[in-house]
Every structure is written in structure tokens, then in C-alpha cells.
């Protein structure tokens, strides 16, 4: 291995070594995989060049020996009558052919295999592949996208064209099947059949697809279609043992259904599904409202309420620092009161915060309501890090700026949290504050309950939440009060980097150092 290759490999191991799998939860960490793959491609190309050079030498030797042996074999005795030819024959067989053997046996792939083997331990896992597939399905449901749209890569806000092959779609369906998600299994296996029928080449066969699809529709209660698909499978592969057993089982169940039909049920009603299935109801009662908000179809302010929203310059109740350079403030919502500020952080500050936060990113957790223990959850897909003022001067500078804007002291605020959302990253509706049954949630911090969230958008999302005028890196939002549902929709495209400190109150210290409490009532 060349010295620069070794240095590059060590550098990437340093980057990837700090990542504990779960790449799909953070686009920031997934970018490291791009550079790791680029390094592997370079290593592979160098291996190919070495192999081509070796084959060129072997071919040249073969051509030379072919011409020589054609001449010598035509008149062996006459050829060997020349002493030099006799010497060269002995030399070739004793020295040159063994040298060629060494060349042929030379392992040119050693460096590439060594590089690949070392980096493989930092590759995404089965968990990552399943998580990535779930993310696409989450986008599919939230934004009402059909598999064909996703397969063609026709997603709003995306910069590059990307398509899913037959084998890719089959992988999506298989991931859903392995998770017991038969609704999405059917959708993606039908997409596979569609692309196969269109003539797309693939290693996946129709028999494989029908095997998964027939059982999935059976699980969704469509016995008629399960029988039909299983018969199609057997017509393609008559020796398929499982399909034969399934067909007998499905036909028996179908016959029993017919026998048990009530007077108000007809056979036509039993077959009424016709391959159209409803999305199963899940654990979140607000699912439809949440997803409609993400698509920009949520509650709209009435003209009367809109008239109560204003834009102004904000000086933080005449804080000296803001008298000279006040912030632009815009009312976003009236109740709860949500305010947007512009140009709160510079591009240099944003990039520095992302730079120091990235190595500390770890899977975001939630508190288990039963045990009180922090744990990962499928409804929060992101990674986050917590920055202290000692980490970098920019943290203290930004914290002080937020204190000036809000009038809330950072002495009782939590550390600056920086989050990075992954594929389809989201945080379903939740409360930032602790409720009555969670009174000790922040006891370990030595503070009271959270009273406000100051949210900084430190990256621009090309397509986010279906919202019009989505905040970019020049914006910050202050939520006052915090006693409201908050959420983060699954990211359609781009890399979302929000940062936020949670302001908390305590009994012993003033929470509002610049204003009287009575002014806030």
C-alpha cells in the first residue's frame, strides 16, 4: 500500500470510527460514507490498472512464445542444431516460465482487499438498510407519493436525478415484509412487477416477487387475490413447494369463508378489495393532522387573526447591544405566540457550530414514560449533540445573543443542542416541557421546567415539510410559551441542521434579568 493511501485510510477510519452505525439517522454522518466510497473506487481503479498491466505482460509473453514454438515445432532437430536455440530453450523452461508462474500467481488485489476489509467494519449495517427503507416509506405516506413516483426519483426539491431499479424496489418490499409491514410490501412488490413487465432487466424474478406478494395480500385478508397470485407463481415454478402448500391452505380458508357467509354477505363482497388496501391505523391519533401539516395543508390563519401579526425591529426591551443593531422580528403565529427573527447568526458561525457539533452527534433519544430511562425511538429519527460554552467561543457568543433577544437568562438554560436529521428524519408531535406526571424530568439539571425553545435554522432545506417559505439558515424562531405541541416533519430532501437551547426557570434565580415579570403577564 502506498504511503498516501495509508494516510488517507487512517484519516477516514478516524472519521468513521466515531460513528456508531445508524447512519440513516443523520445526513451529516452519511456524507462521510460518500468520501469513504470514493476512496474505495480509487483503490479499485488502481487494482484494475495493476491487473491490466499484468495481463498485458502475460499476453505479450504468450504471443512471443506462440510465434517461437510454431517455428521450433516445425523442425525440432533443425531448430536445436543451433547451440544458442538449445541454450535458450533450457533457460526458458528453467527460469523464464517459473518467472511467468510467479507473475500469474501474484496477488494484485491485496491492497484493495486490505482497504475494503478494514473499512467494511464501518459500513452501514442491516439496521441502516432497514432504516433507510423505512425512511422512504415514511416519505411515501407523509407526502402521499406512490412507489412509481419514488422509483423514478421525481421528488420535489431534489437536485440530482436518482431512480430505483427492479432490484432496489424488491429490496424495499422485502424490508417491509421482514418488518411485518404487509401494506408497503404489496405496494413495492406491485411496483417490481410493473417494472419487470416494462422489460427492465434484473436479477429478481417474477416468481420471487409473487412468493412475497401472495403471502402479503393474504395477511391483508384478501384471500381471492392470494389464491390468484399463488396460482400464477405455480405456473412459473411448478416445483415451488411452499407455493403448493400455501395454495391448498388458501383454497381451504376461502371455502370455509364461503360456507360461513351470512345472509347479508355475498361472494362479490368477499372479493370487493380488488387489490386496493387501506393503510393500517397506527399508534399516533394525530397522524392524519400531523401529515397534513407537513404537506402544508394544515390550519390557516383567518384574515382577522392575520391582521394581528406584525413585523418590527426588536431591541430586547432596550438591551444596549440591540439598541445599536436590533433584530428583524416577524410574528408567525398568534397562539401559541411564535416569532421569527432574521440574520441572527452569520454563515461563519453556522459552519463553525456544525463543525464542532458533527463529531459529537449521537442518536437522539426520548425518555421512556414507563421507566424514565432515555432510549431511542422510531418516532424520533435524528442525531444530536450538546455544546458547552467552553467548546468554542462561538457557542458563548450565540447563547448571549439569544439571551439578549429573549430576555431569558442562559444561566438556567440547557446546553445548546444541535440536531441533524437523516433520511426521512422526523420528530413526531411531542411536548418540549414536562407535564404533571413528569415533574422530575429536569431534576438532574438542577433547573425548573422548560419555559421556551429558541430554535435556530442553520441549514436551508430545499424541500422541507411541504411548507411554503420554510425558514433558512438566516432565521431563528422563538416559541413563547413552550406549552404547546411541537413536531418536526420528515425531511423530503436535503440535510436539516436545527439548533436550540431550552430555557428553564428556577425558584432561586431570576429568569428574566432584563424585564419585570409583571410585564410578561
Image (tube, grey):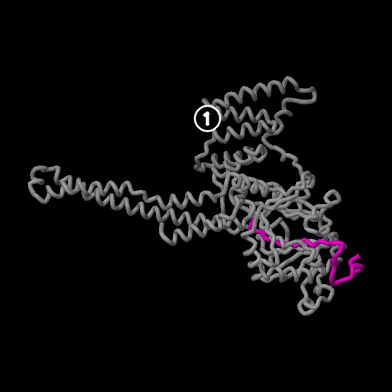
The residue positioned 64% from the left and 30% from the top of the image is 226
Q: Which x, y percent locates residue 218?
A: 66, 31
Quadrant in which residue 485 is drawn: bottom right
User: Residue 441, position in %: x, y?
Assistant: 80, 53
Q: Is residue 345 magenta?
A: no
State the residue in front, 415 or 237. Answer: 415
Is 289 displayed left or right of 154 in the figure? right
Vertical placement of residue 411 versus 53, above or below: below
* Residue that mark 1 sits on: 236
Q: Nearer the viewer, residue 85 or 93?
A: 93
Residue 470 in view, yes or no: no
Disc 1 secondary structure class: helix
From the viewer's side, name the closer residue of 422 and 514: 514
- Extreme residue in the top direction: 259
- Horizontally, residue 76 falls left or right of residue 382, namely left
Query: Which region of the structure is painted magenta?
Result: 493-521
* Image quarter (top left, top right, bottom left or bottom right) of the C terminus: bottom right
Amino acid at each position: 500500500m502506498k504511503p498516501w493511501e495509508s494516510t488517507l485510510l487512517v484519516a477516514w477510519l478516524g472519521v468513521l470510527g466515531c460513528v456508531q452505525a445508524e447512519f440513516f439517522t443523520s445526513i451529516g454522518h452519511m456524507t462521510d460514507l460518500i468520501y469513504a466510497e470514493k476512496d474505495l473506487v480509487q483503490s479499485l481503479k488502481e487494482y484494475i490498472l495493476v491487473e491490466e498491466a499484468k495481463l498485458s505482460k502475460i499476453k505479450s509473453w504468450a504471443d512471443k512464445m506462440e510465434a517461437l514454438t510454431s517455428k521450433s515445432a516445425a523442425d525440432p532437430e533443425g531448430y536445436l542444431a543451433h547451440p544458442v536455440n538449445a541454450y535458450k530453450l533450457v533457460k526458458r523452461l528453467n527460469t523464464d516460465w517459473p518467472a511467468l508462474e510467479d507473475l500469474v500467481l501474484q496477488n494484485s488485489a491485496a491492497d484493495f482487499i486490505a482497504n475494503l476489509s478494514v473499512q467494511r467494519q464501518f459500513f452501514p449495517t442491516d439496521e441502516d438498510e432497514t432504516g433507510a427503507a423505512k425512511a422512504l416509506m415514511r416519505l411515501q405516506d407523509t407526502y402521499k407519493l406512490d412507489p412509481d413516483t419514488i422509483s423514478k426519483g421525481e421528488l420535489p426539491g431534489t437536485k440530482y436525478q436518482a431512480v430505483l431499479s427492479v432490484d432496489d424496489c424488491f429490496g424495499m418490499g422485502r424490508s417491509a415484509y421482514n418488518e411485518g409491514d404487509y401494506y408497503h410490501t404489496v405496494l413495492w412488490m406491485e411496483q417490481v412487477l410493473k417494472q419487470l413487465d416494462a422489460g427492465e432487466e434484473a436479477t429478481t424474478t417474477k416468481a420471487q416477487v409473487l412468493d412475497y406478494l401472495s403471502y402479503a395480500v393474504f395477511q391483508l385478508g384478501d384471500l381471492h387475490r392470494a389464491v390468484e397470485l399463488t396460482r400464477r407463481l405455480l405456473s412459473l415454478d411448478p416445483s415451488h413447494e411452499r407455493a403448493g402448500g400455501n395454495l391448498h391452505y388458501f383454497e381451504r380458508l376461502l371455502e370455509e369463508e364461503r360456507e360461513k357467509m351470512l345472509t347479508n354477505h355475498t361472494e362479490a363482497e368477499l372479493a370487493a378489495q380488488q387489490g386496493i388496501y387501506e393503510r393500517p391505523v397506527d399508534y399516533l391519533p394525530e397522524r392524519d393532522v400531523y401529515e397534513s401539516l407537513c404537506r402544508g395543508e394544515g390550519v390557516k390563519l383567518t384574515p382577522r387573526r392575520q391582521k394581528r401579526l406584525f413585523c418590527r425591529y426588536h431591541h430586547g426591551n432596550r438591551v444596549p447591544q440591540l439598541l445599536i443593531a436590533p433584530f428583524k422580528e416577524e410574528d408567525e403565529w398568534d397562539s401559541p405566540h411564535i416569532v421569527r427573527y432574521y440574520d441572527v447568526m452569520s454563515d461563519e458561525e453556522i459552519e463553525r457550530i456544525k463543525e464542532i457539533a458533527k463529531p459529537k452527534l449521537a442518536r437522539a433519544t426520548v425518555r421512556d414514560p414507563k421507566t424514565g430511562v432515555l432510549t431511542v425511538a422510531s418516532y424520533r429519527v435524528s442525531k444530536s449533540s450538546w455544546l458547552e460554552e467552553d467548546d468554542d467561543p462561538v457557542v458563548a457568543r450565540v447563547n448571549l445573543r439569544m439571551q439578549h433577544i429573549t430576555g431569558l437568562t442562559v444561566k438556567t438554560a440547557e446546553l445548546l443542542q444541535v440536531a441533524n436529521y437523516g433520511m426521512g428524519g422526523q420528530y413526531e408531535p411531542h411536548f418540549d416541557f414536562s407535564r404533571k406526571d413528569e415533574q422530575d424530568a429536569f431534576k438532574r439539571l438542577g433547573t425548573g421546567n422548560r419555559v421556551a425553545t429558541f430554535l435556530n435554522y442553520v441549514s436551508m432545506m430545499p424541500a422541507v415539510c411541504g411548507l411554503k417559505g420554510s425558514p433558512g439558515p438566516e432565521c431563528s424562531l422563538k416559541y413563547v410559551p413552550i406549552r404547546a405541541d411541537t413536531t418536526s416533519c420528515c425531511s423530503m430532501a436535503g440535510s436539516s441542521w436545527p439548533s436550540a437551547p431550552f430555557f428553564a426557570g428556577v425558584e432561586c434565580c431570576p429568569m428574566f434579568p432584563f424585564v419585570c415579570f409583571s410585564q410578561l403577564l
